[in-house]
């Protein structure tokens, strides 16, 4: 008997947004991306011998106050979609009770650019909403598969000797309106964007911040400086009802 113990649930679906709404989200992502490049923020990155990029979160108030009308619906849709995914993919019965944290970043690719292989740390899942995939793209059947055009590539991180190595990679053809949600641990990349225009997407990294051991953690502080109390130390933890206990 062969049981599938650890399949990786990946959501791939059509989002509900109209062309006008996708355009509004696209314009916001493009403007905020340009603003971030022009006004890089300073924050306490660790001193390591590695080049780290500054990041931001479009869900912060200073960005949201500039967002289009559809932004609130977009955020609410992300929330519902993620809870539905957790319920369906992982059998989380009390998904609506979870505290969810999120970070939203705009991603822009000019022709020739790609996302290098990576996974996401500090979060559990990643949601991508594609807003603009350029124009003048060749149909997938006519592409040189070794070059491609902006496909999302997901790689099963588990090692496997020999056969069937090519099935460890899954290609997802991207188009405006497509949403993909996958575990953050999955290594992924994109083929170079080989069409004209600009490739634009919104990426939301998501994490579950309750009903797990996150609430038990305390800060150690730095040498000579007492640790501040975390919110979770000040507030009593809500009790689980009997239906929610593992
Ligand atoms: Fe990514």
Image (cartoon, rainbow, N blue to C red):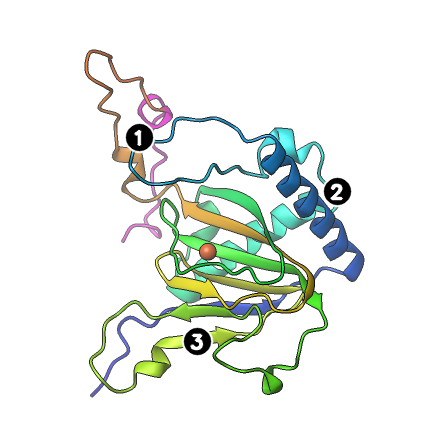
Residue located beneath label 3 in the image: 170
Residue 127 pos. (x, y %): 51, 56
Q: In this view, does 135 lie above or below 44?
A: below
Question: Mark 1 sits on what residue?
Answer: 47
Please state which of the two labelled residues, at mark 1 or mark 3, is closer to the viewer: 1
**Element under label 1?**
loop
Residue 70 lies left or right of residue 129; in this view the side is right
Q: Nearer the viewer, residue 142 or 207?
A: 142
> Residue 227, percent across and down?
26, 17
Residue at image mark 2: 68
Disc nearest the viewer among 3 and 2: 3
- Label 2 SS: loop
Give the camera-side residue of 10 and 85: 10
Q: Is residue 90 found left or right of 160 in the rendered image?
A: right
Dot 1 alpha-carbon crowd within 10 angstroms: few under 14, some 14 to 19, many 20 or more: few
Residue visible at 49% across and 38% down? 55
Q: Residue furthest right?
A: 20
Whole-number angstrom distance, CA of label 3 to CA of label 2:
34 Å
Q: Where is residue 165 in the image (x, y as percent from the top left)?
A: 30, 82
Q: Which residue is drawn at 59% across and 39% down?
A: 58
Q: Label the magenta part by its dominant secondary structure.
A: loop
Viewer-side residue, 55 vs 74 = 55
């Amino acid at each position: 008997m062969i049981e599938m113990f650890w399949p990786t649930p990946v959501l791939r679906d059509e989002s509900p947004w109209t062309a006008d709404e996708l355009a509004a989200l696209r314009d916001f992502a493009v403007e905020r991306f340009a603003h971030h490049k022009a006004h890089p923020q300073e924050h306490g990155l660790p001193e390591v011998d590695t080049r780290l990029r500054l990041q931001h979160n479009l869900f912060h108030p200073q960005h949201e106050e500039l967002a289009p009308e559809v932004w609130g619906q977009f955020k609410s849709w992300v929330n519902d979609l993620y809870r539905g995914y957790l319920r369906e993919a992982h059998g989380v019965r009390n998904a609506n009770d979870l505290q969810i944290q999120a970070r939203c970043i705009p991603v822009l690719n000019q022709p020739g650019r790609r996302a290098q292989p990576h996974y996401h740390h500090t979060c559990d899942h990643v949601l991508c909403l594609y807003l603009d995939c350029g124009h003048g793209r060749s149909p997938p059947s006519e592409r040189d598969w070794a070059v491609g055009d902006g496909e999302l590539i997901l790689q099963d991180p588990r090692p496997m000797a020999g056969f069937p190595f090519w099935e460890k990679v899954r290609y997802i053809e991207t188009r405006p309106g497509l949403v993909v949600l996958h575990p953050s641990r999955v290594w992924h990349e994109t083929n170079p964007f080989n069409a004209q225009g600009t490739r634009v997407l919104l990426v939301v990294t998501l994490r579950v911040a309750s009903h797990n051991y996150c609430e038990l953690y305390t800060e150690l502080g730095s040498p000579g400086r007492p640790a501040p109390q975390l919110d979770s130390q000040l507030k009593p933890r809500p009790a689980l009802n009997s239906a929610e206990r593992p």
